Image (tube, rainbow, N blue to C red):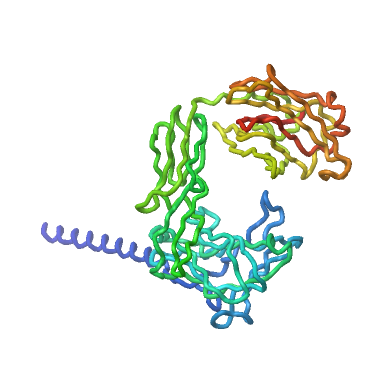
Amino acid sequence: MKSKKIAFILISLLLVFGCQNDDADLQTAKASSIAEIFTDTPIGMGTNFYFPYGAGPDNPIGSKLNAWTVDSKVSYKGNASMRFDVPNSNDVEGNYAGGIFRIDGAGRDLTNYDALTFWAKASQGVTVAEFGFGEDFFPNKYITTMRNVSIGTTWTKFIIPIPDASKLVLEKGMFRYAANTNDTNGKGYTFWIDELKFEKLGTIAQGQASIMNRTNTSLTTFVGVNSKIDNVAAIFNLPTGINQAVSISTSFLEFISSNPSVASVDSTGLVTSLSAGTAVITAKFGDTVANGSLTINCVGTFVHAPTPTKTAANVISIFSNPYTNVPVNYYNGYWAPWQTTVSNDFTVNGDGVLNYTKFNFVGIEFSSPTINATAMTHVHLDAFFPTSIASGRQLRVIVVDFGADGAFNGGDDTRYSTTFTAPTLVSNKWVSIDIPFASMPTLLSRAHLAQIILEGGDNSVLYVDNIYFYK
């Protein structure tokens, strides 16, 4: 009797584990490996799969919602193609065309493919800003993008290499595009795409990846500062003989820190400075080392600017964590060709700091809308020079009002420049600057304030925090 019980238990266990394996097989089977995305119709995409890009800080209008349609009159092969109507730049319904094609349901297993391919032509010769795959709006883990794609008026095949297909076991982001009218003087146009699918070409050479735009970049940071590995790309040799560059996600790479106690780096390329010292961040793409690196020079604990104590009701904030900032167009307009200032802004323990390197001058603009500061009495900002102050060094703070028309250089702009020198300016210490509006005789109005310009740099470094008007 005892042996029968043991036999029954063994049989039961086999049945349980057998069912578990069957369940695992069913889970794997759910990941379709269909290659086609669109032939004469969308293939295996579900019912809700097209998502146009919405409005954002850089584009308050967004993509035209109906830019994509199926055209039954034009095709490379079969009976239909995907039609993209890029709108005029002044179209109120959307000033460009762009969006993603995301599977409505479980993603696809793309591990057997090495490229996304399609045929395309346009109503005129154009350059389309971006084509790619891997964007699903969350988590966008494996985005791959081919940029500035030249399309002519005859059907041509295009190939976007897959950087590492072994990672794409359940991908939802099948296709993405963004097209504007930058090279057509704002005039709209149409392009068509057909036979959009993944392929195993077998003739794409192993890519060479790079980070930091292929440069060995150095960055001075503080404990608690996060930095990001960016400008990640790879070059692949296509069957056509062309070396095709694509921007790729950091998720395709493995990152290494030469000194993890000084700076750590996670799988997304986020670098965290941990202690004083130097660490070099590099990356591997498969078995090869990526070109470029990021050297972290952590100088220790950051000294924060003084915490503002003004009552929020008496402040109009441009940049300050303790207050709610008004809408700002930009903190660095990079006014070519004379400006050299580069922004390397950072955040230390939740406190954002404007970091201007190669500083000669920089424009901060808040003209959408302008600010009515007639009730305010002063301008405030905190400045920090992490390097020595050269003899005769100046910092000029220029406040600009755009006038009643609210437009730059509209004929009624007024401004005033206040100059600071040593001993007001010191190195390695926050300098609090307060300028009364009463001391700005040529600023004829402050009802339409739109810019604060900082000048007087010598290509050194300047930190800025707590920019606001107050009474």
Q: Nearer the viewer, residue 292 or 106?
A: 292
In the picture, which quadrant includes the C terminus? top right
| Left or right: 154, with 235 as reference point | right
- The residue drawn where x is 47% and y is 56% is 142
Give the residue at x 50% y 58%. Answer: 246
Q: Position of residue 132 (x, y in %)?
A: 53, 62
Q: Identify which residue, 228 or 121, lies in the foreground.
A: 121
Lateral position of residue 9 relative to residue 239, left or right: left
Residue 274 visible (yes or no): yes
Q: Quadrant of the N terminus?
A: bottom left
Query: Which quarter of the picture shows residue 381?
Result: top right
Q: Residue at x 58, y 64 (%)?
A: 149
Q: Give the total number of marks visible in the rendering.
A: 0
Residue 82 x %, y %: 60, 73
Q: Is residue 78 above or below residue 34?
A: below
Q: Quadrant of residue 100?
A: bottom right
- Image side of residue 156 versus residue 263, left or right: right
Q: Position of residue 436 (x, y in %)?
A: 80, 24
Task: Mark yes or no: residue 330 visible.
Answer: no
Q: Quadrant of residue 397?
A: top right
Residue, far front: 391
Indicate the position of residue 201 as horizontal and vertical percent values: 41, 70
Q: Give the answer, above or below, for where 362 lies relative to 420.
A: below
Q: Nearest the camera: 326 or 11?
A: 326
